[in-house]
Image (spheres, helix red, strand yellow):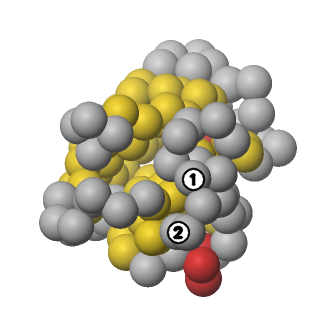
Amino acid sequence: QLQASGGGLVQVGGSLRLSCAASGRTSDTYNMGWFRQAPGKEREFVSTISWRGDFTKYAASVKGRFAISRDNARNTLYLRMNSLKPEDTAVYYCAFRYVGSVHSISKFASDYDYWGQGTLVTVSS
């Protein structure tokens, strides 16, 4: 089970930190990621991080502004979002999949098995 939190209303240029707490069978290695879906648009990849945190990937639209991290002791995924823009407005979803390698990452939504309920981020101009 995944529980996302941290969304809200923020002004252009502001910052937010999203969290996603995983529960259940978290003793195995797993890859996590963030996706988002803006109104009227398809869900899109934002960022992903490997089990060890040594591999990350970002969408070009957020690279340099967002930072993904994880705390395996707390089974929690984070997304620090800086310099927010109106086009970042979306529902943000965390995703989870078990993997065989501590370095595995994926930017494809179809690769993930579990999804959080989403948290809304609204950036006002």
* Residue sitting farthest toward the right: 60
Q: Is residue 118 above or below residue 50?
A: below
- State the image coordinates of residue 6 (x, y, percent, origin top left): 29, 36
Q: Residue at x 65, y 51 (%)?
A: 103
Q: Which mark is residue 4?
A: none
* Residue sitting farthest toward the left: 24
Q: Residue at x 68, y 25 (%)?
A: 65
- The kind of residue on which mark 2 rests is Val
Q: Indicate the secondary structure of the residue bearing disc 2.
A: loop
- State the image coordinates of residue 14 (x, y, percent, origin top left): 50, 17
Along the line of sight, the residue nearer the viewer: 121 or 73: 73
Q: Is residue 63 visible?
A: yes
Q: Which mark is residue 99?
A: 2
Q: Indicate the secondary structure of the residue bearing disc 1.
A: loop
For the image shown, how many numbered marks are present on the structure?
Answer: 2
Q: Is residue 99 above or below residue 90?
A: below
Q: For this view, does 56 lie left or right of residue 92?
A: right
Please tell me how crowded label 1 is: few (under 14), some (14-19), or many (20+) other residues with Cα within 10 Å.
some
Disc 2, disc 1: CB below 8 Å? yes
Q: For this view, does 8 lie left or right of residue 30?
A: left
- State the image coordinates of residue 98 (x, y, percent, origin top left): 45, 70
Q: Residue at x 44, y 79 (%)?
A: 113
Q: Is residue 119 above or below residue 99?
A: above
Q: Residue at x 59, y 78 (%)?
A: 111
Q: Quadrant of the N terminus?
A: bottom left
- State the image coordinates of residue 37 (x, y, percent, origin top left): 54, 64
Q: Quadrant of the C terminus?
A: top right
Gap in angstroms between the C-alphas marked 2 and 1: 7 Å
- The kind of residue on which mark 1 rests is Val
Q: Is residue 87 visible?
A: no
Q: Which mark is residue 102?
A: 1
